[in-house]
Image (cartoon, rainbow, N blue to C red):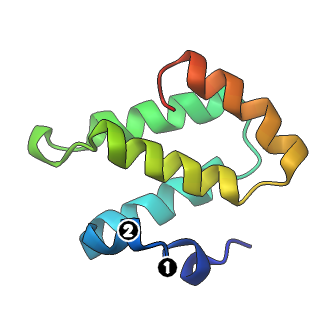
Amino acid sequence: MIDYDNLFGDPAFAAFEPERIEGIKDVMAQLQGKTPAEALGILTEFNRSLPYDRKFGKEERTLMLRAFLHTMPADERKKYEPFLKMTGFL
């Protein structure tokens, strides 16, 4: 179970609109237990589903992914980080 209060207590999320936070929560729930390749597909589809003027910028995507990685055990996180860096998500 993800502790969203702790996770989104980061001051960097203060500027996010509530709808964006809810979208991130939905995506993070979908990412739980997925392989890096599956996660990439989910993240790509999520970004494509947003209207052009609502897409996440690079800084927002990085913050979202760091939040997601923060929810994982260290050994699981190590599997994702190189993949996300290679694809430009981090």
Kind of residue at badge 2? Phe
Seen in the image, is 11 located left or right of residue 26?
A: left
Instruction: Tell me, yes or no, whether the two marked residues, 1 and 2, touch with CB atoms within 8 Å.
Output: yes
As drawn, 21 above or below 48: below
Q: Residue at 38% of width from left, 61% of height from top? A: 23
Quadrant of the rendered image containing residue 59: top left
The mark found on residue 9 in the picture is 1
Q: Residue at 51% of width from left, 37% of height from top? A: 42
Kind of residue at badge 1? Gly
Q: Residue at 26% of width from left, 40% of height from top? A: 57
Q: Residue furthest left?
A: 53
Q: Dot 1: what SS? A: loop
The mark found on residue 68 in the picture is none
Tell me where residue 50 appears, x and y as whole percent. 23, 44
Front residue of this view, candidates 28 and 71: 71
Q: Residue furthest top?
A: 86
Q: Dot 2: what SS? A: helix
Tell me where residue 63 appears, x and y as whole percent. 45, 51
Q: Residue at 69% of width from left, 32% of height from top? A: 81
Distance from disc 1 to disc 2, alpha carbons, whole Å, reads 7 Å
Q: Residue furthest right?
A: 75
Seen in the image, is 27 located left or right of residue 2?
A: left
